[in-house]
Image (cartoon, rainbow, N blue to C red):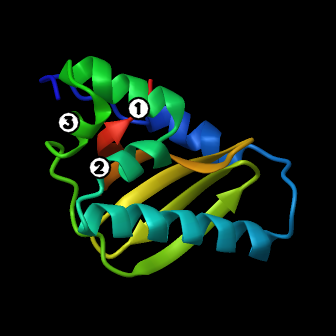
Amino acid sequence: MSGRRRTPGIVAVVVLVTAGACGTPSERRDSVTAQVTRFERALDTGQRERLCTALAPSTREELEQSAKRSCAQAIGEQGLPAAGAVRRVDVYGDQARVVLEHDTLFLARFPAGWKVTAAGCRPRPQRPYQCEIEGG
């Protein structure tokens, strides 16, 4: 990844306030949790293509452009943490935040299902999350 880092900042706030979605809150939470579980399993087993498939299109594109490599090559160089257990799932319309023991992921719902828009995110006091991988 290049030396510059962008944060989801205001985008994350706007993302979390978005309204309107199909399914009950419980169904949306379950779908988000299932996608995060698949993402973390792929990370744990080194399945880079599966990780790339789980990324939102703009996130994948940003990763490839900033690394000047294919997603499968670049994602292995990002140092994503072993996330641990899910601590909290917040779903707001078509956007979600999943707080794990050692990571926070942001997701968005697409026609093909939930996709990761940011990963390797750490909270910072009174500032936006700092993320290893995020979309533009």
Q: In this view, does 133 lie to the left or right of 92?
A: left
| C-beta proximity under 8 Å, tags 2 and 3 | yes
| Residue 48 circle label | 2
- In this view, the residue in front, 120 or 69, is 69
Residue topped by disc 1 = 60
Callout 3 secondary element: helix
What is the three-letter code of the residue carrying label 1?
Arg
Which mark lies nearer to you, 1 or 3?
A: 3
Q: Is residue 131 left or right of residue 10?
A: left
Precedes in sequence: disc 1 or disc 3? 1
Q: Which residue is drawn at 24% across and 42% down?
A: 75
Q: Which residue is drawn at 43% across and 32% down?
A: 59
Query: Could you tell me residue 10's position as x and y percent?
Result: 51, 33
Using a 10 Å C-alpha cutoff, classify the residue at mark 3 as few (fewer than 14 neighbours), some (14 to 19) or many (20 or more): some
State which quarter of the image contains the C terminus: top left
Q: Is residue 124 visible?
A: no
Precedes in sequence: disc 2 or disc 3? 2
Residue topped by disc 3 = 73
Q: Is 62 placed above or below 52 here?
A: above
Q: In which quarter of the image is residue 99?
A: bottom left
